[in-house]
Image (cartoon, helix red, strand yellow):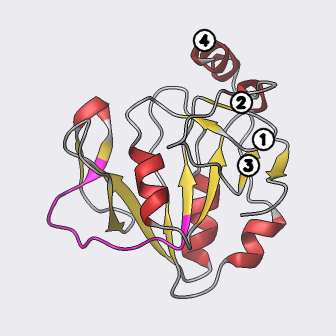
Amino acid sequence: MRAARDAFVAGGPPPITPPAAYLARLRPGLIVASYLPLGSEADPMLLAQAAVEAGCTLALPRTTLREAPIAFHAFAKGAAIETGPFGLRQPHADTPIVRPDILLVPLVGFDGACNRLGQGAGHYDRALTGLPDAWPIGIAWDVQRVAVLPVDPWDRPLAGIVTETGLLERTPPL
């Protein structure tokens, strides 16, 4: 899946634009957790930008160890970024921790039921368990979709996946 994603991105992928269902949820005061893509991860920049334009607070993930929980820290354009474990570009530890209402989630692969294959450390699965009221949306390329992903008891499905061709929503919704 990573090789397919890498090859797709090498060809110059189109931007991933915010779908209407996402834009309809945005309102001032919400906290939207995004991420800074690594390698060929799909770029959520236009979705993050739409959130800021709607008056939302942006947050980015921060982690320290593979087994440590992920935390979301408030982030503003131009704020300093440091490189953390796994090459993750993240806010400094002294920025405020926030509780996201919407999560834009990176992934390696997904299926039609909005199951997600991540990097393998379980950071987002654990975060989603602790944020049951948040709306988690995966950000990916269509080439990352597979027929079926194996699901473990700790895996958390997403409410939807946004790709370069639109939004795939989970049925039934979360």
Image location (x, y in percent) of residue 100: 46, 70
Cα gap from disc 3 to disc 1, whole angstroms = 7 Å
Is 60 placed left or right of 3 in the picture? left
Which comes sooner in the sequence, label 4 or label 2? 4
Q: Which region of the structure is painted magenta?
A: 90-102
Q: Is residue 52 left or right of residue 115?
A: left
Q: Do labels 3 and 2 touch, CB within 8 Å? A: no
Q: Is residue 83 magenta?
A: no
The answer to which of 99 and 84 lies nearer the viewer is 99
126 w.r.t. 110: above or below: below
Secondary element at image label 4: helix
Considering only order in the chain, which callout, 2 or 3, is on the residue closer to the N terminus?
Answer: 2
The kind of residue tagged 2 is Pro
Q: Position of residue 75 (x, y in %)?
A: 35, 66
Q: Say which quarter of the image contains residue 3.
A: top right
Q: CA distance from mark 1 to mark 4?
A: 18 Å
The residue nearer to you, when weighing 105 against 129, is 129
Q: Which residue is mark 3?
A: 162
Residue receiving disc 4: 3
Instruction: Name the disc covering residue 13, or none.
Output: 2
| Marked residue nearer the N-terminal end (3 or 4) | 4
Give the residue drawn at x 53%, y 68%. Answer: 132
**Disc 1 target residue:** 164
Secondary structure beneath disc 3? strand
Frontmost of labels 3 and 1 is 3
